[in-house]
Image (cartoon, rainbow, N blue to C red):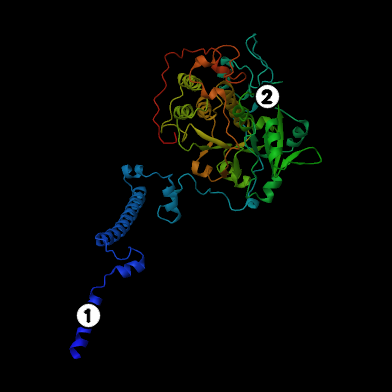
Amino acid sequence: MENRSFSVRLKNRGDRSNQTPHAKDSDDGFFSPGRLPQEYPMKIVWKKGFIRLVLVAGIVWMLLILVVLLFHIWSCQSSVAFLSAICNKESKVVEFLGRFGYVSKPQQSQHRCSIPVADDPDKIVIPEKRTADKIVKNLTYILEDEFVHNGSQSSPLFGGHQSWSQREESFKLKPSMKVHCGFMRNGGAEMTAVDIKYVKKCKFVVASGIFDGYDVPHQPANISRRSKKLFCFLMVVDEVSLAFIRNNVTVREDSGGGQWVGIWRLILVKHPPYDEPRRNGKVPKILTHRLFPQAQYSIWIDGKMELIVDPLLMLERYLWRGKHTFAIAQHKFHRSIYEEADANKRRKRYARPLIDLHMKIYYYEGMEPWNSKKSIPSDVPEGAIIIREHTALSNLFSCLWFNEVHLFTPRDQLSFGYVVYRLGGSFKFFMFPNCEYNAMFVLHQHIREHSSPIEWVKDLKELKGKGSSMKESRGGLGLWTPYPGNLDSVVLPEVARTSKAG
């Protein structure tokens, strides 16, 4: 009996030892019952190895990113010129790192800095006396063309038919001067009677302009009560833009017939004087003193900009503190007009052969590329903000600057430094750092981008012949009037591009 029970136990033990793992595996759903795949151990190894490979690859990738970021930070902070040049200080990486303090503030925000303005607009003392006119004491304007027309020239032109001899004479400073300065009789850009009456009371002006429906007015911020009472905020528009603004924002009409968008008084100019909307925009921008003749001080801002600094603080900082009458910012990238011209050609901002012709005339007349020996920090300004006291010399400079825009290309940044050069240092102005300029406003995108056929012209042959649709009919007169000098031998100076943006 005992032997039998022992044999039963052995049998039972044997049965258990013969059980295969497939039953458990079947429960887990890996394999079908009754079969033990030979590749089972390899699948286990492969599965574990793949997971380890993914984890290792992830760790290596994160370490590589960390190394790159650390190198980026180190190169941006390095004093070694080569390493510093590697760092793209405008990249999103630098901007992101700067938020967490990994990149020093000057590097992360090299184009925006605090403006040393006074703290309180109410404490600003406005000068009782205007700046005395010492060089030019009496300035008047030519209102009728003295040029004898022939059948090939249109008349009248807003800027007049200024001859080369008249242009040359206009740069010779005298106590009493009479010059071309736009607004030729029947030349266009006429204001309505309601607006003419309104602007007569404006001695302190913030001016802007919208042409061809590019934008809608952006309301200034941080404006004190004192400045709201002191300044007229005047937005110059053409009829196309007025209709566009009416369709997109609320326009309020007062009892006198004036039209308003928030703080901005809309100033309608009828009969735009030029084919190019960009050239039309230069009328209120450069000839602010002609459009608003009662103004003693003006601040111009481009239409796509939202001003965020109190205008009274701006006058104190840029004019009164240093006893200046004209202030404008230095260009962000370029100092030489020839480099700026090169950038305009590559970006198709105007006909390339006409830009070259414009620059050849300037180079022939002695305009050298900017260098450190010049008395001004740059020949190229950022023209989107201009701060002026309307003295006789300041007004004359604006007239001469506009005449160049009228005669040649509408790219006013190409003409500014040339007029400074021709006045031989007599015109003193304050060219302030670009980083302050960028701290004055919030930049908005245009509603739509402007494009005209002349911007795509590659060869002068495309502009030949009467009735050419690619040629402006009322601007750029000096590019089509025979120049008195021989430009054939003029070779423009080589341009060294000092920035990727240029």
Is residue 500 visible to us here?
Answer: yes
List x then y, in percent, for residue 4. 20, 87
In the image, 411 versus 321, the foreground residue is: 411
Position of the N terminus, as image quadrant, is bottom left
Marks 2/1 in contact by CB < 8 Å: the verdict is no
- Amino acid at pointer 1: Lys
Is residue 294 visible to us here?
Answer: no
Q: How many marks?
A: 2
Indicate which disc residue 139 carries: none
Position of the C terminus, as image quadrant, is top left
Q: Where is mark 1, residue-wise?
A: 11
In the image, 135 versus 2, the foreground residue is: 2
| Circle nearer the viewer, 2 or 1 | 1
- Amino acid at pointer 2: Phe
List x then y, in percent, for residue 370. 43, 30
Query: Could you tell me which secondary element the residue under label 2 belongs to?
Result: loop
- Report the side of 498 relative to 131 (left or right): left
Q: Residue at point 37% right, 48% down? A: 76
Q: Relative to 3, is 21 above or below?
A: above
- The residue carrying pointer 1 sits among few (fewer than 14), some (14 to 19) or many (20 or more) residues within 10 Å by Cα, namely few
Query: Could you tell me which secondary element the residue under label 1 belongs to?
Result: helix
In the image, 265 versus 122, the foreground residue is: 265
- The residue carrying pointer 2 sits among few (fewer than 14), some (14 to 19) or many (20 or more) residues within 10 Å by Cα, namely many
Q: Most extreme residue toward the top, as rendered?
A: 151
Q: Earlier in the sequence, mark 2 or mark 1?
A: 1
Indicate which disc residue 183 carries: 2
